[in-house]
Amino acid sequence: MSLNPPLLLTADETADLLRTTHSRGRQNAMDELLTVDELAEWLKVPKSWVYEHTRTNCPDPLPSIRLGKYRRFIAADVRRYLQARRLTASDDC
């Protein structure tokens, strides 16, 4: 599996993403933006595990988006990440 850094969006791309998801009202669950707390709960892991797996020194980081000081996760991207991890044996960070 390739070592891809977390997805970083420009300010304009972030604004477009937020405008698009907000304009749809209740968004599709696959497009849902998750917080660190929500992702940790969904994966049933501690928040510290989520943070550890978003660091740049992690060999297989979780796909995430930086919004200023906040980190968000697109549910569909995390699902693809989990599917890929099921197919390969990868060490933790």
Image (cartoon, grey):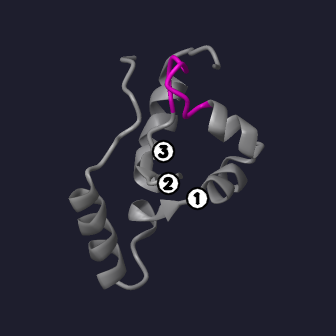
Residue 59 image point, x, y percent: 51, 17
User: Mark 2 Cα within 10 Å, few/some/many (few <14, many 20+)?
Assistant: some
Q: Residue at x 42, y 48 (%)?
A: 65
Q: Label 1's element?
A: loop
- Residue 58 falls left or right of residue 49: left
User: Which residue in the structure is indicated by mark 1?
Assistant: 35
Q: Distance between the residues labelled 1 and 3?
A: 12 Å
Q: Where is residue 88 in the image (x, y as percent from the top left)?
A: 50, 17
| Residue located 41% across and 35% down the image | 6
Q: Position of residue 44 (x, y in %)?
A: 75, 47
State the mark number for residue 78. 3
Quarter in which the C terminus is drawn: top right
Magenta segment range?
Answer: 53-61
Q: Distance between the residues labelled 2 and 1?
A: 5 Å
* Dominant secondary structure, magenta: loop
Tell me which amino acid carries mark 3.
Val
The Cα atoms of the two marked residues, 3 and 2, are separated by: 11 Å
Which of the image's four quarters has the N terminus? Answer: top left
In this orientation, which residue lies closer to the viewer: 35 or 87? 35
Image label count: 3
Picture layout, residue 14 above or below residue 40: below
Q: Is mark 3 on a helix, strand or loop?
A: helix
Amino acid beneath label 2 = Arg
Q: Residue at x 40, y 71 (%)?
A: 28
Q: Nearer the viewer, mark 3 or mark 2?
A: 2
Which sits in the foreground, 42 or 62?
Answer: 62
Q: Earlier in the sequence, mark 3 or mark 2?
A: 2
Q: Which residue position is annotated with label 2? A: 72
> Would residue 21 be found to the left or right of residue 92 on screen?
left
Residue at 29% in and 75% down? 19
Determine whether label 2 and label 1 are within 8 Å by CB: yes
